[in-house]
Image: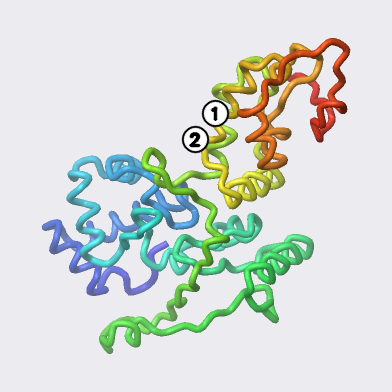
């Protein structure tokens, strides 16, 4: 993922100087950082991991975690962020085509707000991507790759000695487009965390075997409507404890039912859901078809 000229770039030399190592060793650490980001934080929000976890994923355990992260920040390879804690600097520039396609298929931005390229999408996926761009108020590109104004590194920093590589100018991110929520216990919450918690605490309710794009989009809708992971956890607990929701009346709650509407989350928590004699699911306005139990 390292671009040509990275070894001799002043930022790499600054990183090496901060850590007391050679530029070649610093380049290896940068490669490890970028590979760990691709694996664990495709949007570039590497701050979702603790400093110790970042270093472990880099297999750089000989260096004290806080010291290494501080060096990355000081050299400009990692930026502090008010939402994600830490993001990889210009990650959209270092990320390969697979990462761009992964985000574009899910209609997600990079953590710094940059829109991913859509060059590897098929026609159907690209139409969905274009529809999302229009919802976000972005112009539909003439080609498969969305364009944004760029500046060279020299123009950005004023240092004419830097490599003249185009760097995307970050696009401001509307609050409505963020797919994370903030709370003290979970600085960054992913849609997958909802399915993981369901599977770990569902009791005898149906397991989520595949977290597909439809489920991901539905969870994102819930998050945008203010349903936090903590609120979802409370609703899951109610699903396993309240008679009707846990299946005592012949119907049982499922992950898909719970995420279908934000009102289902609040209803699961607030209503009694006791089993009534001769009660039928449709009379209780379940708003979804019964789901077969998967053991």
Q: As drawn, is 96 to the left or to the right of 278?
A: left
Element under disc 2: helix
| Image-based side of 267 in relation to 292, left or right | left
Q: Is 233 above or below relative to 181? A: above
- Vertical placement of residue 13 versus 230, above or below: below
Give the percent coordinates (x, y) of residue 264. Answer: 69, 35
Q: Quadrant of residue 49?
A: top left
Outermost left residue: 20
Within-10-Å neighbours for mark 1: few <14, some 14–19, many 20+: some
Q: Is residue 242 left or right of residue 156?
A: right
Task: Tell me the residue that label 1 is attached to.
Answer: 234
The x and y percentages for residue 107 are 63, 59
Q: Is 184 located above or below residue 70 in the figure? A: above
Q: Callout 1: helix, strand or loop?
A: helix
Q: Nearer the viewer, residue 285 or 39?
A: 285
> Which residue was labeled with disc 2?
230
Circle 1/circle 2 CB separation < 8 Å: yes
Question: What residue sits 33% from the left and 45% below the top?
Answer: 54
Q: Position of residue 221 (x, y in %)?
A: 64, 50
For this view, does 53 lie left or right of residue 244?
A: left
| Residue count near mark 2 (Cα–Cα under 10 Å), binned few <14, some 14–19, many ≥20 | few
């Amino acid at each position: 993922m390292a671009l040509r000229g990275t070894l001799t770039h002043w930022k790499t030399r600054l990183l090496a100087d901060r850590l007391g190592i050679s530029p070649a060793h610093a380049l290896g650490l940068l490669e490890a950082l970028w590979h760990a980001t691709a694996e664990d934080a495709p949007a570039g929000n590497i701050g979702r991991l603790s400093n110790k976890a970042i270093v472990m994923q880099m297999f750089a355990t000989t260096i004290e975690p806080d010291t290494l992260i501080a060096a990355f920040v000081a050299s400009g390879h990692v930026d502090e962020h008010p939402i994600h804690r830490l993001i990889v600097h210009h990650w959209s520039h270092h990320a390969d085509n697979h990462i761009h396609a992964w985000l574009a298929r899910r209609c997600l931005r990079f953590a710094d707000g940059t829109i991913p390229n859509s060059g590897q999408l098929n026609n159907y996926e690209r139409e969905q991507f274009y529809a999302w761009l229009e919802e976000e108020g972005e112009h539909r590109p003439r080609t498969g790759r969305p364009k944004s104004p760029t500046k060279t590194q020299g123009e950005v920093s004023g240092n004419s000695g830097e490599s003249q590589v185009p760097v995307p100018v970050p696009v401001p991110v509307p609050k409505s487009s963020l797919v994370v929520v903030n709370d003290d216990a979970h600085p960054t919450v992913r849609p997958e965390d909802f399915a993981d918690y369901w599977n770990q605490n569902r009791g005898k309710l149906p397991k989520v075997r595949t977290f597909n794009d439809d489920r991901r989009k539905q969870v994102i809708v819930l998050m945008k409507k203010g349903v936090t992971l903590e609120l979802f956890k409370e609703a899951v607990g109610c699903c396993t404890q309240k008679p009707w929701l846990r299946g005592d009346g012949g119907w049982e709650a499922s992950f898909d039912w719970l995420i279908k509407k934000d009102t289902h989350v609040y209803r699961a928590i607030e209503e009694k859901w006791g089993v009534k004699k001769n009660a039928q699911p449709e009379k209780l306005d379940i708003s979804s078809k019964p789901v077969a139990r998967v053991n």
